[in-house]
Amino acid sequence: ISAEVAGRIAKIHPNFEVGSYFYKGDVLIELDEEDVTQQQISYENARANKILAASQFEVAKTTIKEYQEGSYQTELAVKEMALVVSQTNLKSAKDINGHTQKMFRKGYVSKLELGSKADTVRHAELEVRARQTELDVFQNITRAKVLQELEANLDAARARLAAEEAALKLEKQKLGREQLRAPFDGRVVVKQVGLGQQVNATTVLGEVIAVDYAEVRLPL
């Protein structure tokens, strides 16, 4: 039989002596109250960690949704508007350049002014290409990269939550085990611990055997 939790043995009951019989549910060994208190603290810490992990998991899920439905759409609209504005400016520059060419052929504007309007068109064309490239990168690369990072954060939060839930389950199982109770009816064969000894969950306390009955021999 082994200890189920760590602690210092504060009391060994008479029914945990070599040769003694015990019944299922009998208290065999009790741990120090300070260890019991520490176990309760460990449980509360595990519960707090689980609550925090659950909160962080929900935040990670919400962040993805907010990005896809909120900030991404907002920034996308801004970049699309910038492209529309640049396209409008290009059309306007081309219209003005076409009119200037007509005026140049009639001798109303100088060659220098004609060249200036042509430069404006070229600059407007570069601006359109730049805004289109920016939009393409945002839709096809930036969005995927951001989502990949957010999904990685979600996976990490999910893994942490699972770990904290498992830790909480383990700590909960330890509660109330400051008293080692007999798992069945039996008799103590070997006792390997003493009062005040520090034990852990794997410490062997002794050897017991199950008995269905006790044989009593009386003199004739």
Image (tube, rainbow, N blue to C red):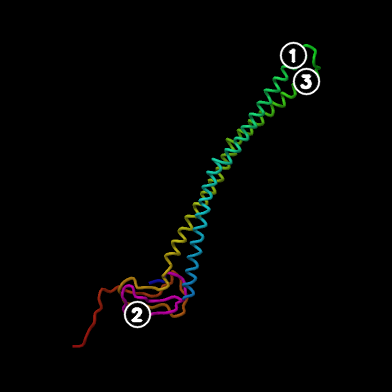
Q: State which quadrant residue 216 falls in.
A: bottom left
The answer to whether mark 3 and mark 2 are in CB contact below 8 A is: no
The residue labelled by disc 2 is 15
Residue 26: image x %, image y %?
Answer: 34, 75
Residue 46's mark? none
Residue 7: image x %, image y %?
Answer: 47, 73
Residue 145: image x %, image y %?
Answer: 58, 41
The residue labelled by disc 1 is 102
Residue 16 belongs to the span the image colors magenta: yes
Q: Earlier in the sequence, mark 3 or mark 2?
A: 2
Q: Amino acid at mark 1?
A: Lys
| Left or right, residue 4 beside residue 60 | left
Residue 52 belongs to the span the image colors magenta: no
Give the foreground label among 3 and 1. Answer: 1
* 197 up-or-down from 129: above or below: below
Cα distance in 3D space between marks 3 and 2: 109 Å
* 128 up-or-down from 191: above or below: above
Residue drawn at (67%, 23%) of the image: 91
